[in-house]
Image (spheres, rainbow, N blue to C red):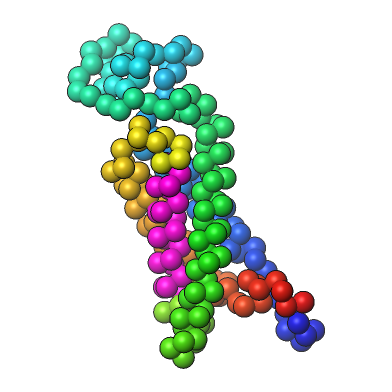
């Protein structure tokens, strides 16, 4: 790399991945099954599965629900673990997707510093964030979190991810080749 070319920082992309990961972990926690622990005491599985339908301390139970996962007993540890997993999934998806976007725009002789490239990257990040939350839900909760709820959380994170990525690209620009290719030194 020559001295006249200034290297762009990866900080905007790293902050985007970290922010989306924390947001995805929060959304995943909101759609997750309820905890087996309430008021410091372990609930019977039947009562814990009806968490949202209890009325009062000795309330009545109506309807059915999924059995909660044991990971929901440790919310802080699971939150950090799911955020860490989602960050890795997002980083891998974006690290693979940015060169593909650059290649596709070069193939069709389009400039990658356009609004179309920013929209393409925002769609990629939204799909990656949505997919990452579904995968994290499957790893963390297995069959105890209905796939419908995982997809609902994925769509919510995808919406926020699209807007956040578009804002980052509009402010800091499309990731340049120098910021993603470390072999040019």
What x and y, as percent, mark residue 82? Answer: 51, 41
- Which sits in the foreground, 11 or 74? 74
**In the image, is residue 18 above or below residue 73?**
below
Relative placement, left or right, of 155 versus 75 is left
Residue visible at 48% across and 29% down in the picture: 71
Which image quadrant is residue 67 in?
top left
Residue visible at 41% across and 60% down in the picture: 126
What x and y, as percent, mark residue 121? Answer: 46, 70
Residue 167 visible within the image: no
Residue visible at 31% across and 38% down in the picture: 146
- Which sits in the foreground, 105 or 168? 105
- Write down the region rendered in magenta: 118-137
Residue ranking furthest to the right: 3
The total of numbered circles placed on residues is: 0
Residue 159 visible within the image: yes
Q: Main secondary structure of the magenta part?
A: helix
What x and y, as percent, mark residue 49? Answer: 32, 22
- Assess whether residue 68 is covered by the magenta stretch: no
Q: Where's the C terminus, which quadrant?
A: bottom right
Relative placement, left or right, of 180 versus 144 is right
Residue ranking furthest to the bottom: 109
Residue ranking furthest to the left: 63
Residue visible at 56% across and 38% down in the picture: 80
Q: Where's the N terminus, which quadrant?
A: bottom right
**In the image, is residue 51 above or below residue 153?**
above
What x and y, as percent, mark residue 51? Answer: 32, 22
**In the image, is residue 181 above or below residue 5?**
above
- Assess whether residue 125 is covered by the magenta stretch: yes
Residue ranking furthest to the top: 58
């Amino acid at each position: 790399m020559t001295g006249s070319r200034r290297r762009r920082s990866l900080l905007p992309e790293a902050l985007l991945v970290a922010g989306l990961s924390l947001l995805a972990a929060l959304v995943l926690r909101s759609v997750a099954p309820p905890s087996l622990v309430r008021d410091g005491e372990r609930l019977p599985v039947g009562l814990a599965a009806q968490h949202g339908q209890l009325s009062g301390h000795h309330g009545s139970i109506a309807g059915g629900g999924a059995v909660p996962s044991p990971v929901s007993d440790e919310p802080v540890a699971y939150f950090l673990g799911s955020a860490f997993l989602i960050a890795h999934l997002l980083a891998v998806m974006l690290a693979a997707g940015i060169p593909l976007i650059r290649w596709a725009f070069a193939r069709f002789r389009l400039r990658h510093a356009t609004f179309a490239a920013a929209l393409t990257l925002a769609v990629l990040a939204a799909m990656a964030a949505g997919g990452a939350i579904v995968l994290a839900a499957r790893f963390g909760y297995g069959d105890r979190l209905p796939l419908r709820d995982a997809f609902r959380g994925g769509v919510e994170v995808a919406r926020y991810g699209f807007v956040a990525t578009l804002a980052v690209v509009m402010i800091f620009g499309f990731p340049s080749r120098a910021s993603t290719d470390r072999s040019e030194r």
